[in-house]
């Protein structure tokens, strides 16, 4: 390892560290963009279908939502389950790894409420 980076993948279940072995860096590599945590928030709040996710008030673009859902699936935070065959339609469900983000979202929600009065705490988080 040089500069905290792994040079090869140990096993299929163990990710290769691209930039750093710092857990915050690796978390941000998955969750650190403008949209990903909002998609996870909506899944925590019970949305499952693409149409429900695209209707969030933040107005995520369709191509960005599709990209984030694919990335969350690849990272093991979401599973995609078919609910209709023709045409193919899917529901997105948080895995245990994805559900483990619930307390993170709760903490962020509390922090935002404290520092940005008038914002809304999502009671289902």
Image (cartoon, rainbow, N blue to C red):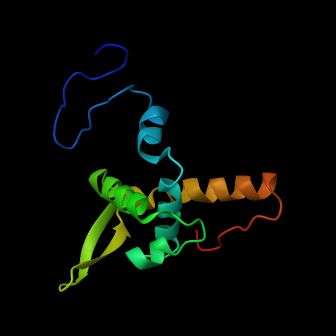
Most foreground residue, 30 or 108: 30
Residue 105 in sight in this render = yes
* Picture coordinates of residue 85, whole percent (x, y): 18, 84
* Picture coordinates of residue 1, whole percent (x, y): 28, 16
Please report the residue visible at 42 percent of the width from the left and 78 percent of the height from the top: 51
Where 86 sits versus 21, above or below? Answer: below
* Picture coordinates of residue 115, whole percent (x, y): 80, 51
Image position of 112 (left or right of 4) = right
- Residue found at the far top of this picture: 2
Residue 57 sits in quarter: bottom right
Please report the residue visible at 36 percent of the width from the left and 19 percent of the height from the top: 4
Residue 56 sits in quarter: bottom right
* Picture coordinates of residue 18, whole percent (x, y): 32, 29
Q: Quadrant of the C terminus?
A: bottom right
Please report the residue visible at 76 percent of the width from the left and 59 percent of the height from the top: 113
Residue 48 in sight in this render = no
């Amino acid at each position: 390892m040089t500069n905290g980076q792994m040079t090869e993948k140990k096993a299929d279940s163990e990710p290769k560290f691209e930039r750093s072995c710092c857990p915050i860096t690796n978390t941000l590599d998955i969750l650190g963009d403008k949209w990903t945590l909002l998609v996870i928030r909506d899944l925590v709040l019970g949305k499952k279908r693409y149409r429900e996710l695209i209707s969030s008030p933040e107005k995520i673009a369709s191509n960005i939502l599709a990209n984030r859902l694919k990335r969350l699936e690849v990272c093991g935070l979401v599973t995609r389950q078919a609910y209709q065959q023709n045409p193919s339609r899917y529901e997105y469900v948080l895995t245990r790894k994805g559900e483990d983000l619930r307390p993170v979202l709760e903490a962020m929600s509390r922090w935002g409420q404290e520092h940005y009065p008038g914002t809304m705490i999502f009671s289902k988080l």
